[in-house]
Amino acid sequence: MSFVASPSVRAYAGRNGVDLERLAEKLGRELIGREDVDQFLAGDTPKSSSAGPTSDHAQFWDVDHGQFGPVREEPMSRFAQVSAQNLAAANAMIPQVTHHDRADMRAVEAFRQSIKAEMAQKGVKLTALAFHLKALAATLKAFPKFNASLSADGKTLVLKQYVHIGVAVDTPHGLLVPVVRDVDQKGIVQIANDIADIAGRAQARKIRPEELAGASMAVSSLGGIGGIGFTPIVNPPQLAILGISRTETVPQWDGKNWQPVPMTPLDLSYDHRVINGAEAARFVVHLTDLLATPKKLI
């Protein structure tokens, strides 16, 4: 029987010796989520049902909305169903906390403007996101606990020696998070080219399944849309995710005068089972310091 499962669920099942194809046959459905694997490992039989909610709370969704007025139905794609299951499971399983801060982007913007013409001649679109990824990679190296995963039994921390960063891409067929690999070993221009490449192929549905797996951490940027902050959901087996909102110019007192400063809101959600609030605050302080002084990244 064919089945649908996200890369993270496939990896989780593989680590725990669970045959997803046999599990799908046992359930009598195609969509398999992490909670199905967890129930199987716990010795419980996951509920055989459609791709909808599998808990006893499903009754809250089973409502005839047409009794209140006109409605129309739009089927959820398989990808959207898998994503919904994973997000719901992650939100239920992880004690998540979000730390909010802002990054001074004056130096980054000044540097981008200084080489804008040169980059344009080379066909490079040097966005601020490339600097965010480079700064995040350096911060993950400085704070290895964030570049880790918790074992399934919660007893072992797996510290990664690589730095791969997932970049959330909004596409017509759903949110994809392809991975830029070895960000710590690449320069700003290469990172910018990699972002453009994976974003373009994600929009065209040309991303390979293996390109969606293996991230140390993910970045979700809403800077091109708007907002002053949000709470991104940690996607296991990762321990944290960084949200980036739209840069706005705010007044800052320099001791003598008010100065207009471009500030970017940053939202770091993290798994509180492994990371505490002080560690998260120090992580973000280090990250914002690198963005304020990008010469440290070059």
Image: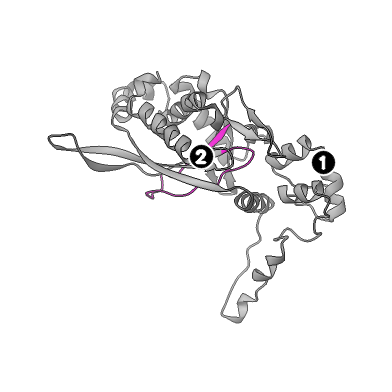
User: In the orientation shown, which residue stands out farthest toward the bottom?
Assistant: 67
Q: Where is residue 189 shown, x and y percent of the image?
A: 44, 22
Neighbor class of circle 2 (other Cα within 10 Å; few <14, some 14-19, many 20+) is: few
Considering only vertical position in the picture, is 138 above or below 18?
Answer: above
The reply, left or right, for residue 5 in relation to residue 103 is right
Residue shown at 26% from the left, 42% from the top: 249
Report the disc number at residue 276.
2
Find residue 129 and report its image quarter. top left
Of all residues, the one furthest to the left in this rendering is 256
Marks 1 and 2 close (CB-CB < 8 Å): no
Assess whether residue 286 is covered by the magenta stretch: no
Q: Position of residue 130 (x, y in %)?
A: 44, 29
Give 149 or 264, whichever is nearer the viewer: 149
* Type of amino acid at the residue the image marks with label 1: Val
Quarter of the image where one finds residue 202: top right
Tell me how far mark 1 sits from mark 2, CA to CA: 32 Å
Give the residue pinned by disc 1.
18
Q: Is residue 181 above or below residue 6?
A: above
Q: Which residues are magenta?
A: 215-239
Q: Is residue 223 visible?
A: no
